[in-house]
Image (spheres, helix red, strand yellow):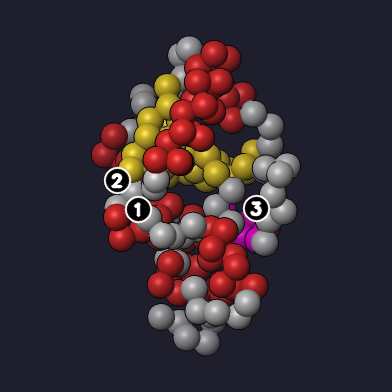
Amino acid sequence: MRICLFPGTFDPVTLGHVDIVNRALPLFDKIIIGVGTNTAKTPMFSAQQRIEWFNQIYANEPKIECAAYEGLTIDFCKKIGAQFILRGIRFVSDFEYEKSIADANRTMDQQIETIFLTGEPKYTSVASTIVRDILKNNGNATPFLPKAVIDTLYPISKS
């Protein structure tokens, strides 16, 4: 069974994240979306909220599971039996950063391979950091968000 971990903070879940998961679905038997705790980041939304969003988005997709984790991604892969790590790439700079992490992970465990998927061009401007800034300044972030997130953040509009 090809088990893949898609790790990230997903704070909040964006259309870019959903795009990567959707395009990875045919490649793996199971994708576990790992909502990680990054000590360098202070999340705007609880891990439970982010997991709830993914559970709503993928309620009818049996190949998707979601879990929170702390510590090294490579250790979480071992714990859940994932042989692959999925990462989304928007820009060349993303690749350089992600490649250094992939190289470190490969050094720690050569049995776990990192797979990069490039984001759809229409989602390259979608970053959780930008969305958080829009939200903090009472802007309209709906063009960047899946319906489950919009319904939570903008309950009156119910798009």
Residue 118: horizontal and vertical position, in percent? 33, 43
Residue 64: horizontal and vertical position, in percent? 42, 44
Residue occupying the point 57% across, 25% down? 74
Label 1: which secondary element: helix
Label 2: which secondary element: helix
Q: CA distance from mark 1 to mark 3?
A: 20 Å
Badge count: 3
Q: Residues within 10 Å of mark 2 (few under 14, many from 20)?
A: few
* Mark with earlier residue (1, 3): 1
Residue occupying the point 68% across, 37% down? 70
Give the quarter of the image for residue 48.
bottom right
Residue 89: horizontal and vertical position, in percent? 40, 42
Is 50 part of what is drawn in magenta? yes
Three-letter amino acid code at disc 1? Asp
Residue 156 relative to residue 42: left or right: left
Label 3: which secondary element: helix
Label annotation for residue 47: 3
Label annotation for residue 23: 2
Placement of 8 over or under 107, stated as above or below: below
Label annotation for residue 128: none
Magenta-colored span: 45-52
Evaluate if marks 2 and 1 touch, with contact meaning CB atoms under 8 Å apart: yes
Where does label 1 land, which residue?
A: 19
